[in-house]
Image: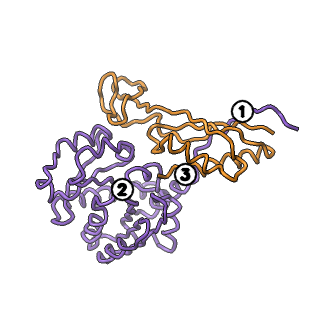
Amino acid sequence: MHELSIAMSIVEMAQEEAERRGQAQVLAVHLRLGLLSGVVKEALLSSYDMACEATPLEGSQLLIEEIPVEVFCPKCKVARRIESIQWFCCPKCLTPTTEILHGKELEVVALEIKS
Amino acid sequence: MTTEPRLVEVRKSVLKQNDFIARALRERFRQAGVLAVSLVSSPGSGKTAFLEKTLTLLQPRYKVAALVGDLATENDAARLARSQAPVKQILTGTVCHLEAAMVQNALDGWDLNRLDFLFIENVGNLVCPSSYDLGEDLRFVLLSVTEGEDKPLKYPTIFNSADVAVITKSDLAAAVEFDEAAAQRNIQAVRPGMEVFKLSAKTGEGMNDLLEFLARRRAGSRRVAAASK
């Protein structure tokens, strides 16, 4: 369970960004979370509230956009979304592939702030 | 003055600090010509036994060292010290995984130029270590025959993040009716093309193939390092 330390990093990062923007108050943090990031959405959401306690971000929201896993199929030569992370192959032609284009994201993309 | 809420773009990786340190470590390993190999597995898969055997067998020909992560005890370092290789324990406290900064701190005072191989044993955990790059050249995921063939399907993220799978405790395979074909199938499903070794640190069975692989990889990374100098 490493979601709490991840949540604390998110809070810290959001706080720094808000300070750089003239001590703005953070209302919400928008996060992109890949299904292959190794971080569990539910655990992260509950950790986030804990991480916000007694910080300027208390009461703010974490809005998570889950990013599916997309691979490049070497045979079809196109990006394809895989249906299961238990089977890394092109869903159309079934060619195995390890070239991952999306799904490892763990990034703060935007903040909703109020001055 | 209070303004209306507004949305500002940030676009920053949450793990950027870790990734930054990991990249610096990888560069240090490359320049020193040391092959860094990390080990991940569930608790009790035989990481320490595997590492002890590997260190002992590499020792006559190479300069090897190891960092071992553990929550609370220094037992692993004591066991590994029997191999005569320099070993340092990283106590993570309540943290369930190693981070690049812990590796960086543990290497303080070590001259990497004098090493051929550096092994980094992660905390026994198949979930959390997958998110953290440690700057290693190769990540080994260990799976013991007693754990069941479906481990890769249960923890696809960590298997996908690894470069090599090592099936350990092969001496017990018959006793637990280990289905090697199923294990191979599952490993290849979550990480197509992954190299797989099956071995027993206890009997030594299969260790030679692994040692040859390590020697080859080290020679390869040395060539790359020399070419870029």
Q: Which of B115 and B54 is in front in this view?
A: B54
Residue A72 falls in which quadrant of the image?
A: top left
Percent across and percent down for residue A50 are 60, 50
Dot 1 corresponds to which residue? B7
Q: Which amino acid does label 1 sit on?
A: Leu
Dot 2 corresponds to which residue? B40
Q: Nearer the viewer, residue B29 or A60?
A: A60
Alpha carbon separation for disc pair 3 and 2: 21 Å
Dot 3 corresponds to which residue? A4
Which chain hosts label 1?
A: B
Q: According to the colouring, which chain is orange? A: A
Alpha carbon separation for disc pair 3 and 1: 25 Å
Q: Which mark is residue B156?
A: none
Discs 3, 2 touching: Cβ within 8 Å: no
The residue sitting at 17% across, 64% down in the picture is B204
Query: Residue placed farthest to the left in the image?
Result: B174
